[in-house]
Image: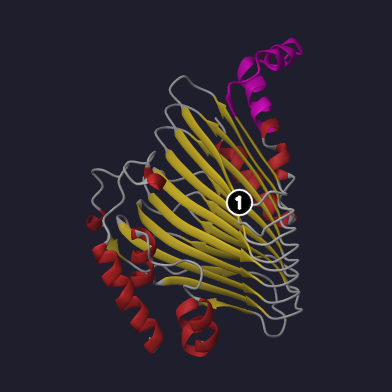
Amino acid sequence: MTAFLAERRQAAAERSAALPVPTIKDEHWRYTNLRGIDFGSFARVSSPVILSGGSLPAGVLFMDLEQAAREHPELIERHLGAIVGTDEKFAAENAALWTDGVLVYVPKGVTVEEPLKATFTISKHGAAQQWRVLVIAEESSRVAFMEEHAEGLPGYANGVAELHVGPNANVEYVSFQHRHLETLHFASHRAEVARDAELDWVAVALGSKTGKSRMESRLTGPGSTAKLTGAYVLDGTQHVDLDTTQEHDAPHATSDLFFKGVLSESARSVWRGVIRVAKDAQKTDAYQENRNLVLSPKAHADSIPGLEIKANDVRCTHGATIGRVDPEALYYLMSRGLDRPAAERLIVEGFFVDAFDRIRSPELREQVQQALLAKLP
């Protein structure tokens, strides 16, 4: 282990020890109660990360993060931890303990033609997996990357992902979570998008017993764009909390968030989204929309949009709905010969079509679509 990494781990361990486990008194945790969870009962175990992708252009790095810290220390020291700090319990714990890490580095002007994928899995029952992802896309580069959290065995997963999208770069980033239904899954994802750059961020949540993901995007340069797409299908007693921010720190930047979820049985979802616009971020164009389809009386969705605007020449809007299957659409399909379950299924499949259309990579779109439709009740 390099000296700088050892020093950072030690400082983060001290910080983590000083921070309490969040409670519902904490603003970001008001809807997710961790009482009764013994995080110390999970044994920390490193699980191999499976990396897949086509041939890589010269200069591209797609490799184990700790190995990268040894072989490319200046690159890792400059970027690791630069945009996700240790001011929150789970992020600090991860900074101290991560073992399963991946680096994606694309040099200036380079395009990676085929999508890259890293698959994280808990390989031992009751294990704790501390995973870490670092994506660095230099100026005018282009890459598509999927971070997959596969089913595996029950346990506790805690991770951090940092995305640095350089000037005029284009990154498609898919976070695909279908953990075991008895797993706890927590994550802090944060991206910074520079001048004239574009981030296409897709988040899919199908698994875990209790999960919370913080998804923060910061537009730091004029002309930058962040397109954020979310899809979740929850059943049983699943509880998934998605906490998003669209932070506009530069003028003439655009963000567009579109999340959709389907809930059945006694599942619960929480989406809390905030658009923040700095004083000098004039000509901001920001939008957020969350739509939920609730299929049973005991399922529940919370949808909480918010705006914090300090500039005066902006366009910021939001929308949210929580509803059931449209009875007129159901009647129409049943009148055409479908039984009720088939008609409901067709309506729910159609509910996600516009979300699927926002996934640019055909390969990644196909994988997400198949997994999501397979989870539908």
Badge 1 crowding class, 10 Å Cα cut-off, few under 14, some 14 to 19, many 20 or more, is some
Relative to 219, residue 308 above or below:
above
| SS for dot 1 | loop
**Towards the viewer: 1 or 257:** 257
- What residue type is disc 1 on? Lys
- Residue 351 lies in quadrant: top right
Query: Is residue 145 visible from the viewing direction of this image?
Result: yes
Q: Give the quadrant of residue 193.
A: bottom right
Q: Classify residue 167 by image quadrant.
A: bottom right
Residue beneath the point at 56% across and 70% down? 51
Q: Is residue 347 magenta?
A: yes
**Spot occupied by residue 278 in the image (x, y as percentages of width and height):** 61, 56
Q: How many marks?
A: 1
- Where, quadrant-wise, is the N terminus in this rendering? bottom left
Q: Which residues are magenta?
A: 321-349
Nearer the observer, 350 or 124: 350
Q: Which residue is mark 1?
A: 310
Q: Is residue 98 left or right of residue 235?
A: left
Q: Quadrant of the C terminus?
A: top right
- Drawn side of residue 154 relative to residue 317, left or right: left
Q: Nearer the viewer, residue 17 or 38?
A: 17
**Image position, residue 20 (x, y; %):** 26, 56
Q: Write the residue at 27% across / 60% down.
A: 19
Please tell me whether residue 20 belongs to the stretch shown in magenta: no
The figure's colour scheme reads secondary structure
Observer-nearest of 93 and 98: 93
In the displayed structure, would residue 113 be above or below residue 316? Answer: below
Whether residue 180 is visible: no
Q: Position of residue 144 (x, y in %)?
A: 68, 64
Q: Residue at x 73, y 66 (%)?
A: 197
Q: Main secondary structure of the magenta part?
A: helix
